[in-house]
Image (cartoon, helix red, strand yellow):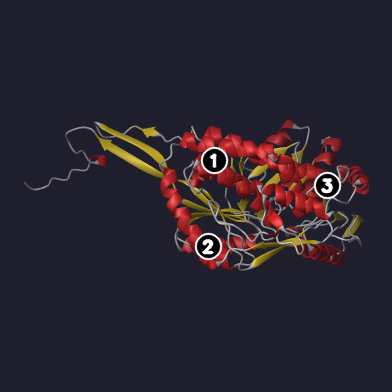
Amino acid sequence: MADSDIEQLCRHFDLPLRVEGVTGALAATGTTGTVGIAAPADEIECFSPIDGRRLGRVPATTPADYEATMRRAVEAAHRWADVPAPRRGELVRLIAEALRQNLNQLAQLIALENGKLIGEARGEVQEMIDIADFAVGQARMLYGRTMHSERTQHRLYEQWHPLGVVGIITAFNFPVAVWSWNAFIATICGNVCVWKPSPKTPLCSLAVQRLCRQVLEQQQAPAVFQLVLDPGTRLVRALIEDRRAALISFTGSTAVGRQVAQTVAARLGRALLELGGNGAIIVDDSADLELATRAIVFGALGTAGQRCTTTRRVLVTRSRLDELRARLVHAYRQARIGDPRDPDTLVGPVIDQNAVRNFEQALAAARALGAEVLVGGRVLPRPGHYVEPAIVLARNDWDIVQRETFAPILYLIPVDSLEQAIELQNQTPYGLSSGLFTRRLDAAELYLSHRGSDCGIANVNLGTSGAEIGGAFGGEKDTGGGREAGSDAWKAYMRRQTNTINWGSTLPLAQGIEFKVPP
């Protein structure tokens, strides 16, 4: 990796990255302004998983800066709520234009800091643009309902109001897209967003905030986007506990999500949780195996197995096991592992050395139970964090199979019937994403019925990964129950108010109650 790569990207986005021996924008120590970037007290070290090299350091938010950020957010929320929703949508439209103009540069930064394939990185930025376009339309469709009152000369209806400040806590694997799902919808709903990104990908978040700040300043808009960079847990705990944050949207592990839910519930706040997954694809006797193989390989290898929607289990009927196994093993052996910026690469690095250890430990646990590793499973001896994606012949009831390992490990599990496959799929604690490959209409309908998949996302002849923004994204059980992005997910960022207007001259009571006040 050339030093010029990070230098050019940091200069392009005016990022406050400290690099020894470099002057100018790269040596900046942070600025203040509409996005609330902190002054340099603590710092966050930035590494690239491509070769493990330290890119530099960025300033972290101090407790004093956090308090100033929240005060700005509250003040901005009062002003922003008065702006008509279609005008809020116009601001998001302009941010989408800025993202279009900077798509390639932002994708390069994602690939460099996150290790995501350059094609996937471009797709992540495009996803931001898509949700922005969706939000612009949604800004004119924040509908309430009018109901018929049981009382004469009364009108009964409901309307929706902004919550105020929304805290958004995101993970490294989608360093910018998940923020946009929340932020763009929350913004057109009249809220101000305070973003706490993963400390593993601070440069991506800073770049997005720089683009947002430029648009805000050009439009003389309130400071609706704020950023908190926390190298540890002190400030994220403060945000979760802060009553000024009416909603906390958290994306991360189930274990941490439980703590977030408990803390927010203790102050009677709202929590939107997008947690773990253990995605399964069922392959039945009639499935198109070429189609299924392509979907499984993308679902298992995309983002090096570090998606919550990653395909981690394949439940295949025994009559198709041998052929599907051969197809998958062949595909894995052809998958090129390397620099994610190379367009011929199919598998990039995992995020860090801890992810490598989790990969090794999961495979060791599977082998100890008698699993057969069909292909892959090695840690590659090269700079960076590279592993060979593994396919493991396993049993669904093994504890290691029931866990979410954020690494490219695919468990191949034989089943006797579709009904058994559905039962095994649903036995996992998680309930995010699932898929069935079949040519049978009755199988597809069973799978999508109440007796089928218990996941928030259930697909037929599609894999577990790659949801469109038009549908609500989220899952059940240990996945948290939240919904983001499309459909009516906007309601999570607003409060409902029921209104009754008496336009008559009498005061009838509901349910026909008679209450006579003495003269």
Residue 93's label in the rendered image is: none
Identify residue type, mark 3: Arg
* Residue furthest front as drawn: 23
Residue 341's label in the rendered image is: 3
Dot 2 surroundings within 10 Å: few (below 14), some, or many (20 or more)?
many
Q: Earlier in the sequence, mark 1 or mark 3?
A: 1
The answer to whether marks 1 and 3 mark residues whose Cβ atoms lie closer than 8 Å is no
Instruction: Provide the residue designation for mark 2.
Output: 66
Task: Classify the position of the N terminus by image quarter.
Answer: bottom right
The answer to whether marks 3 and 2 mark residues whose Cβ atoms lie closer than 8 Å is no
Dot 1 surroundings within 10 Å: few (below 14), some, or many (20 or more)?
few
Q: Is residue 433 left or right of residue 195?
A: right
Identify residue type, mark 1: Gln
Dot 3 surroundings within 10 Å: few (below 14), some, or many (20 or more)?
some
Instruction: Provide the residue designation for mark 1.
Output: 218
Q: Position of residue 49 (x, y in %)?
A: 80, 58
| Secondary structure state at the residue bearing disc 1 | helix
Distance from disc 1 to disc 3, alpha carbons, whole Å, reads: 33 Å
Q: Position of residue 130 (x, y in %)?
A: 64, 36
Identify residue type, mark 2: Tyr
Is 127 or 507 nearer to us in this picture?
127
For discs 2 and 1, the disc positioned in front in the rendered view: 1
Is 334 or 394 nearer to us in this picture?
334
| Secondary structure state at the residue bearing disc 2 | helix
> Which of the 4 image quadrants contains residue 83?
top left
Distance from disc 2 to disc 1, alpha carbons, whole Å, reads: 25 Å
Distance from disc 3 to disc 2, alpha carbons, whole Å, reads: 35 Å
For discs 1 and 3, the disc positioned in front in the rendered view: 1
| Secondary structure state at the residue bearing disc 3 | loop
- Residue appearing at x 79%, y 47% in the figure: 302
